Image (cartoon, grey):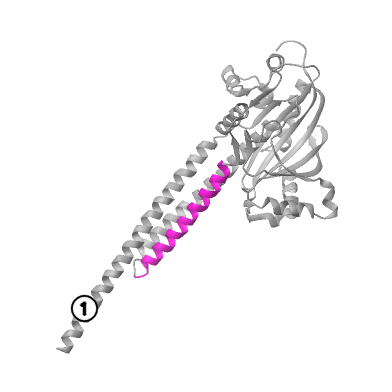
Amino acid sequence: MTGSELMVRSGQVVALRLFDLANEIDLKRAETLWARRPESASTQGASTRSRLVRTPAKAVAFGVAPLTLEFGTVALDIGAARIDAAVGVRLYDFGIAALSLRLPVQDLSWSRFTRLVNRTDQAVGPAAPADVWEGVLAKLRGLLGDALDHPTAVPLQEDYLLAVVDAFEEPITAEALQQRADLIPLLAGEERPLSEGARRDLLRHRFSYYPDDLVAITWDRAFIYEPRHETDVADVLEMANAQLLEMRTYDEMLDAELPRMRDMAEAARRHTNFLAARRYARLARGLHSLVAEVSELAERVDNALQVTEDVYLARVYAAAMDLFRVPNVSAAVDRKLAIIRATYTALHDEAAGARAELLEIVILVLIAVEIVVSLLRA
């Protein structure tokens, strides 16, 4: 690091916690319910449909624009300080609610800014008590519960932390910023020095579009320097987290379904009788419905964000998806769906075989009856 310590003129620290609230969220219904909320809650802010600011709509677009709600402020104990954080919620139609706590930053040295980021993680991150998140989640469910289709009793969750700088005390390029500020303690959350290999890994995913902007992302944190106050990168990172969470939900749902499916198939095979065909067919229909439902929802998640012409955002988005291991989870979901499809096919064939056997038995019985009747007549 060279030169005097940088001063952060303005920015924010954003703590995200995403919840899988339901199979789907009716965003139009949620918007209507938000507009009709009680007088006591009406000061919490308006609702808006999210869009990417810098990028043309034809280059990058949401499949279904998420709904953004403002929930007022909440006081947080960050280290020895008490800071008012703006509370926001963004709802995605595929069932995810992204809760955010935004702590304003003004006139902090780089080292103090880094400490604020790490203390925010300690106060509201994955290892901290979840009281503030649970409070916001309870309010959200109370206001918009009717918009949730098949609400989740115990939702899965993901956390992410954004350190955003809008302006330094002096104009600075991305190259000069990396020479004068040590990003490692901020990105790693570590106060102890890291090895050169660990430092290289943390700084592997860095991106710039203009000479004076910079994004550095890791699997659980990101640093964003954006002097034009654009939020596209932050929005894309949130979307990648939402897709990860939804894929995790499908993966766990299929994990629970596979043993049950095997037990049901074994039970159907053990109790062979004249109703076997019906039992096989009923089980096969259930598996077919499950495959269709998960496939449809997974396709909706895959199409939640379309990046076509914006190469910069496409690189950031692809790196985030890779870091978050979304393709790995998606591949696991596909493998489990393939197992269920194969089981469905086998059960369908067994049902057809059982029906054929039953038909053969009926024919043989009819022939035997015909022979007996003929003999009696003779």
At label 1, which amino acid type do we have?
A: Ala
Name the residue: 38% across, 58% down.
348
Task: Where is residue 109? Give x, y as percent.
Answer: 79, 20
The residue range painted magenta reads 274-302
Q: Is residue 51 above or below residue 190?
A: below
Instruction: Residue at the far left: name it.
Output: 378
The quarter of the picture where the N terminus appears is top right
Task: Where is residue 97? Give x, y as percent.
Answer: 67, 45
Task: Where is residue 228? Give x, y as percent.
Answer: 75, 26
Which is more toward the observer, 47 or 118? 47
Secondary structure mostly seen in magenta is: helix
**Picture quadrant where residue 206 is located:** top right
**Picture quadrant where residue 120 is located:** top right
For the question of whether residue 247 can be seen, the reply is yes
Task: Where is residue 331? Give x, y as percent.
Answer: 48, 40
Q: Residues within 10 Å of mark 1 (few under 14, many from 20)?
A: few
For the question of whether residue 191 can be seen, the reply is no
Membership of 278 in magenta stretch? yes
Name the residue: 52% across, 53% down.
293
Identify the element where label 1 is drawn. Answer: helix
Name the residue: 61% across, 21% down.
203
For mark 1, what is the residue? 368
**Picture quadrant where residue 345 is located:** bottom left
